[in-house]
Amino acid sequence: QSAITFLLATALGLMPWTGFLPAAIWGVRRPTRDRRSAVRFTVAMIAVSSLLFYALSASKLASYSLALLPPLSVVVGLFLDDILAMPRKNATASFRATGVALAALALGLLAIPLLHGSVLRTRDLIGGVPTAQDSVAFWRLVVPIALVLLAGAVLILRLPNRGRIAALYAVGLAAPLAALLGASPLLADAYPW
């Protein structure tokens, strides 16, 4: 595993806000007398140092990327606050990037079941999946999540800025719930205790 593992895990961990990350990182500058820019710069450096530390360590697990999520969330949050203060047309590109990222993730999730058997098996990803459920387990898991992400992408592309933020919050709440609901029959069979 490499630093790419951490970057992918972080991108997934920041969903649905991942589309804002490139622009938020691009906006990080050396701090001036402004406290806001000092906070932005400091948390960005915390994220960079965490990425370097875990990427260079001998033992690499995707869960180590959790250390990147709080500082990057602050950077994205400050960026979103800046977006809400600017005119609508300047904010549109970031929201479009987020909508496209959500739609791409949804389509990627829908492609996973198509790879079943040739590249992926449910048992390899989740473990303990009964053989009878192995072929349909991916569909039950990814379709609800993909539908939430696609609905969020459409709303983000159609609504005004404040509505887009609300849609992102809704996706951030609904996607994990859809994952839990989609996985609950599978997990109940796989882990009956």
Image (spheres, rainbow, N blue to C red):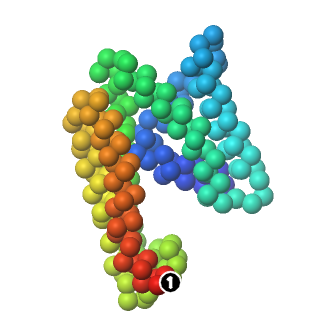
Q: Residue at x 63, y 12 (%)?
A: 32
Residue found at the far right of this picture: 58
For residue 38, which quarter of the picture?
Answer: top right
Q: Which residue is mark 1?
A: 193
Q: Residue at x 32, y 58 (%)?
A: 146
The percent coordinates of residue 122 (x first, y second) are 45, 77
Tell me: 12 left or right of 6. Answer: left
The percent coordinates of residue 22 (x first, y second) are 49, 34
Q: Is residue 7 above or below residue 22?
A: below
Q: Is residue 93 visible?
A: yes
Q: Is residue 52 above or below residue 162?
A: below
Q: Residue at x 49, y 33 (%)?
A: 76
Query: What amino acid type should be assigned to the residue bearing mark 1?
Result: Trp
For residue 98, which quarter of the picture?
Answer: top left
Q: Residue at x 71, y 50 (%)?
A: 54
| SS for callout 1 | loop
Between 16 and 117, the one lying in front of the other is 16
Q: Is residue 117 visible?
A: no
The percent coordinates of residue 37 (x first, y second) are 58, 19
Quadrant the N terminus occupies: bottom right
Residue found at the far left of this picture: 158
The percent coordinates of residue 64 (x first, y second) are 65, 54
For residue 97, which quarter of the picture?
Answer: top left
Between 58 and 78, the one lying in front of the other is 78
